[in-house]
């Protein structure tokens, strides 16, 4: 069993992305989730989950309970190994002093025969304290609420302890849209681009298509976690720009920061409603639909473009993720998709992004 430390403000979305790297993900408190198994190299490629740790135990979110748990826990680590403790108070929700927690829990480990090495320990004990509102859905799984609407089921107080197994590579700031070789206003930030690529199934051995690839941001993130990526766009300017960005980030000999080989890439000009691919040709499709108030579309009405793209995606893949400034759920169902999950992500006062995960 593992516990995950989720990041960002939308735990449900973070947990959904984490399912690309872990089995049976289920939130247990704000910022925390459990999983039955994890794939460490995929955890390194997550955007909205920061760490996965092998669960030692969980208790109430106070230092006395954490200490009692650690004193009683069965620890199967080599006593000649060095250890360190790192604690976090999720969203500052518990008021627990993380400095005191690290010091007291570190002393417990010393008392049990371990040596402490704060700089380069053999094992790192993660301790996460969290309190907040929690609701269980119909199948008994947890679903975190950002507010009290919908009837909060219970308040939770959780401290989870575990040995760090993997953590995500936080290098997204090096790929900010404005820092890419080719930039256009409105480009998706790399955190969201990585997350939707993961939800679409990006991983080594998979092929991911973006039929409205724009500057290629989603393709870059999918390629960095090892997927082979293919992009099309109706505008020659965007095709050329996406090629520039993909060449810059994916045409390198060394492994990507996530530790896997970068995927191959291909980009060409094309119509998202008439894709030149055989049925079932790719593993996943992901696209950021044009925003009606901001984009000029020369060849299609926006509704026809999105509906056509959804139909083509259904023909060539079994999974898709759509990002837009409105929900296209009705059009997705008409195209033959099942709506597996839907999320709303507020960008700023005048823009909310809708994310649809389709199966």
Image (spheres, rainbow, N blue to C red):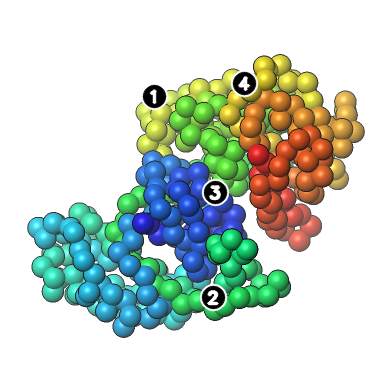
**Residue underneath mark 2:** 132
**Alpha carbon distance from label 2 to label 3:** 22 Å
**Alpha carbon distance from label 1 to label 4:** 27 Å
Label 4 vs 2, first from the N-terminus = 2
Q: Of tags 3 and 4, which is closer to the observer?
A: 4
Secondary structure of residue under mark 3: helix
Q: Do the residues labelled 1 and 3 touch (CB within 8 Å)?
A: no
Judging depth in this view, the residue of 184 and 133 nearest the camera is 133
**x and y, in percent, of residue 30 in the image:** 52, 68
Q: Do the residues labelled 3 and 4 touch (CB within 8 Å)?
A: no
Secondary structure of residue under mark 4: loop
Q: Is residue 247 visible?
A: no
Label 1 vs 3, first from the N-terminus = 3
**Alpha carbon distance from label 1 to label 3:** 28 Å
Q: In this view, does 282 lie above or below 24?
A: above
| Mark 1 surroundings: few (<14), some (14-19) or many (≥20) residues within 10 A | few
**Residue underneath mark 1:** 253
Q: Do the residues labelled 1 and 2 touch (CB within 8 Å)?
A: no
Q: Of tags 4 and 2, which is closer to the observer?
A: 4
Secondary structure of residue under mark 1: loop
Q: Which residue is drawn at 50% across and 59% down?
A: 26
**Residue underneath mark 4:** 281
Q: In this view, does 8 lie above or below 105?
A: above
**Residue underneath mark 3:** 17
Q: Which residue is drawn at 48% across and 34% down?
A: 203
Label 1 vs 4, first from the N-terminus = 1
């Amino acid at each position: 069993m593992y516990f995950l430390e989720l990041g960002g403000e939308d735990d449900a979305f973070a947990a959904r992305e984490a399912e690309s790297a872990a089995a049976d993900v289920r939130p247990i408190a704000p910022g925390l989730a459990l999983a039955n198994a994890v794939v460490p190299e995929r955890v390194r490629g997550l955007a909205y989950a920061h760490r996965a740790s092998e669960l030692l135990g969980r208790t109430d979110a106070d230092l006395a309970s954490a200490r009692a748990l650690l004193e009683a826990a069965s620890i199967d680590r080599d006593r000649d190994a060095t250890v360190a403790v790192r604690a976090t108070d999720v969203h500052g929700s518990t008021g627990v002093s993380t400095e005191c927690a690290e010091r007291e829990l570190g002393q417990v480990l010393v008392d049990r025969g371990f040596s402490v090495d704060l700089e380069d320990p053999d094992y790192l004990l993660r301790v996460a304290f969290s309190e907040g509102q929690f609701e269980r859905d119909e199948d008994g799984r947890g679903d975190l609420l950002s507010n009290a609407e919908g009837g909060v089921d219970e308040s939770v107080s959780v401290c989870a302890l575990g040995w760090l197994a993997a953590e995500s590579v936080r290098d997204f700031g090096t790929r900010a849209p404005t820092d890419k070789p080719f930039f256009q206003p409105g480009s998706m930030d790399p955190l969201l681009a990585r997350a939707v690529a993961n939800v679409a199934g990006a991983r080594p051995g998979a092929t991911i298509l973006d039929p409205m690839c724009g500057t290629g941001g989603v393709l870059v993130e999918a390629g960095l976690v090892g997927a082979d990526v293919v992009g099309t766009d109706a505008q020659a300017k965007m095709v050329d720009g996406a090629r520039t960005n993909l060449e810059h980030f994916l045409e390198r000999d060394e492994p990507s920061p996530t530790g896997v080989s970068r995927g191959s890439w291909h980009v060409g000009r094309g119509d998202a409603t008439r894709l030149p691919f055989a049925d079932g040709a790719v593993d996943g499709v992901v696209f950021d639909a044009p925003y009606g108030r901001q984009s000029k579309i020369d060849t299609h009405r926006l509704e026809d473009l999105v509906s056509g793209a959804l139909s083509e995606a259904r023909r060539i893949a079994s999974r898709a993720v759509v990002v837009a400034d409105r929900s296209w759920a009705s059009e997705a169902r008409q195209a033959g998709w099942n709506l597996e999950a839907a999320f709303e992500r507020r960008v700023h006062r005048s823009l909310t992004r809708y994310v649809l995960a389709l199966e």
